[in-house]
Image: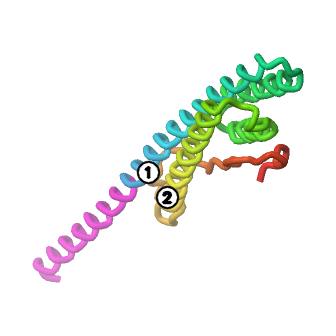
Amino acid sequence: MTDSTVIVIVVAVVVVALIVGGWLYGRANRLDRLNVRVDLARQSLESALDRRTVVVRAIAAWMATNGDPQARAAARELLTCADAAEHAPWEAREDVENALSAALARVEADSRPAALVGELADAETRVMMARRFYNDAVRDTLALADRFLVRALRLGGRSTRPHYFEIVERMTPGQGDAPE
């Protein structure tokens, strides 16, 4: 082999190494950005869920002032579900949010003031949108994280795999105990 052949081989190896290294760096960077997107979407979802809980507390407070014992019992159930939703760890949040939705579905919307009906509708819309953004971010992150080379070379580092957040978006009366 001549010196020029060795130089060409060395240059070719360096160029290929730079291209592969750049690609790997780009994938790792993209995965990191997607994980940040999941974290931000989760924070937004948690805020929307917390806002809905505040509205539920307002509905329960209004119902508790009603003289009807059945309304006071429903208010206590709503408050219990709201407390559980506020204090649940993220891993258990789906179940308690579904229980809160079921409790809300058992309360007749006609019995609430129009302002609270509007606030609840707005809060539920925000939850629905935040959940969809979060699940979109999870889907994109998992799509990249599940690729063979990304897994094999551990480009995701030590980040945990995100999980979808599945709750019943809106329940109508009669669905109270049967989340979809």
Verify whether residue 8 appears in magenta: yes
Eyeballing the image, is 106 above or below 169? above
Q: Quadrant of residue 126?
A: top right
* Residue carrying label 2: 140
Instruction: Mark 1: give few (<14), some (14-19) or many (20+) Cα within 10 Å.
Output: many
Circle 1/circle 2 CB separation < 8 Å: yes
Eyeballing the image, is 178 above or below 62? below
Q: Residue 117: percent from the left, percent from the top?
A: 64, 35
| Amino acid at dot 2 | Asp
Q: Which residues are magenta?
A: 1-28
Name the image colouring. rainbow
Q: Nearer the viewer, residue 14 or 164?
A: 164
Numbered tag placed on residue 34 in the rendering: 1
Residue 136 showing in the rendered view: yes
**Number of residue marks:** 2
Q: Residue 124: percent from the left, percent from the top?
A: 61, 41
Verify whether residue 31 appears in magenta: no
Q: Residue 37: percent from the left, percent from the top?
A: 44, 46
Question: In which quadrant of the rendered image does the C terminus lie?
Answer: bottom right
Q: Is residue 94 left or right of residue 8?
A: right
| Amino acid at dot 1 | Leu
Q: Nearer the viewer, residue 128 or 135?
A: 128
**Residue at position x 61%, y 49% in the image:** 163
